[in-house]
Amino acid sequence: MDYKDKLMPEHIAIIVDGNRRWAKKRGLDTKLGHKKGFERLEEIIKYATSLDIKYISLFVFSTENFNRDKAEVDYLMKIFSNNFRKLAIRMNEENIKVIFSGSKNLLSDKVKHSMRFMENLTVDNTQAVVNFCLNYGGREEIVSVCKLISKEVRNGMINIDSIDEDLIECYLYNELPPIDLMIRTSGEQRISNFMLWQLAYSELYFTETLFPDFKKEDFDAAIVEYGRRDRRFGVNGGVNK
């Protein structure tokens, strides 16, 4: 698609959803759905950065996902630990920086080592930033911010009257621009505790397509819809319109 003169988002977020249903529809093991989903993830990252989108946040594993069957969780952790290193090398070649948002608690040492490898290898890259939200919860992120700021106020490092939106953003997992467009695959129409602060004025796009089937054409459709939206940022909107 020709994106010349079209309104393009700076920061896109994707709730990666539907891997298990994709496998179930085909009578396949759930693991194959997750494998196919990760492969699709690589394709979408490459395509999005080729369109000069600067920030991509990907919800790949929530804090609640640890409540799933242990065998499935273990397999997902294996996918992350085995594939992050390979993906890091490809991203480094394309000048893409990788960061992570979420808690390190409950993650295996292998996963944490792979995460550090990705971050360290790509730390100086400037073409785009890919933010993997792994063991992530939006409420937990905000609670973490409150604890950190409270501690600094108690230690005299911050004056309570200086707390504002800009300061809070400095204490989030990562300092990123607001999300312009949030895409959720699989037909579910909710944000599922994902980047609650950053989604405040985002455009939301929901598609029935299961993530392993989410191709370039589906991504294009989301961008086209985004270009049709009248972004108001609270002006003439909300309860007092």
Image (cartoon, helix red, strand yellow):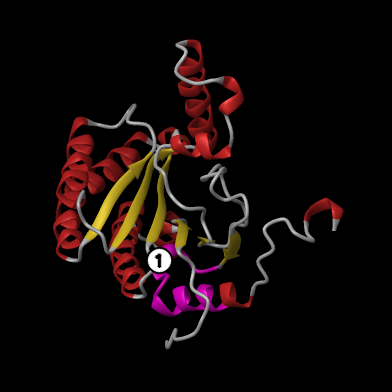
Total number of numbered discs in the rendering: 1
Q: Which of 75 and 149 lies nearest the eye of the viewer?
A: 149
- Residue 160 point in image, percent of width and height: 58, 21
Left or right of 187? Residue 96 is left
Residue 3 forms part of the magenta stretch? no
- Mark 1 neighbour density, 10 Å: few (under 14) some (14–19) many (20 or more): few
Residue 209 forms part of the magenta stretch? yes
**Residues drawn in magenta:** 208-224
- Residue 11 point in image, percent of width and height: 45, 60
Label 1: state its secondary structure: loop
Q: Amino acid at mark 1?
A: Arg
User: Splitting the image into 4 quarters, where does residue 43 fall?
Assistant: bottom left
Left or right of 78? Residue 204 is right
158 relative to 29, above or below: above
- Residue 192 point in image, percent of width and height: 56, 45
Q: Residue at x 21, y 57 (%)?
A: 125
Residue found at the far right of this picture: 240
Q: Residue at x 65, y 66 (%)?
A: 231
Q: Residue at x 22, y 35 (%)?
A: 112
159 relative to 49, above or below: above
Q: Which of 53 and 37 lies nearest the eye of the viewer?
A: 53
Q: Which of 184 and 32 lies nearest the eye of the viewer?
A: 184
Q: Residue at x 37, y 32 (%)?
A: 103
- Residue 135 point in image, percent of width and height: 39, 37
Q: Quadrant of the C terminus?
A: bottom right
User: Splitting the image into 4 quarters, where does residue 70 fall?
Assistant: top left
Q: Quadrant of the N terminus?
A: bottom left
Q: Which residue is mark 1?
A: 26
Magenta: predominant secondary structure element? helix
Left or right of 39? Residue 8 is right
15 relative to 1, above or below: above
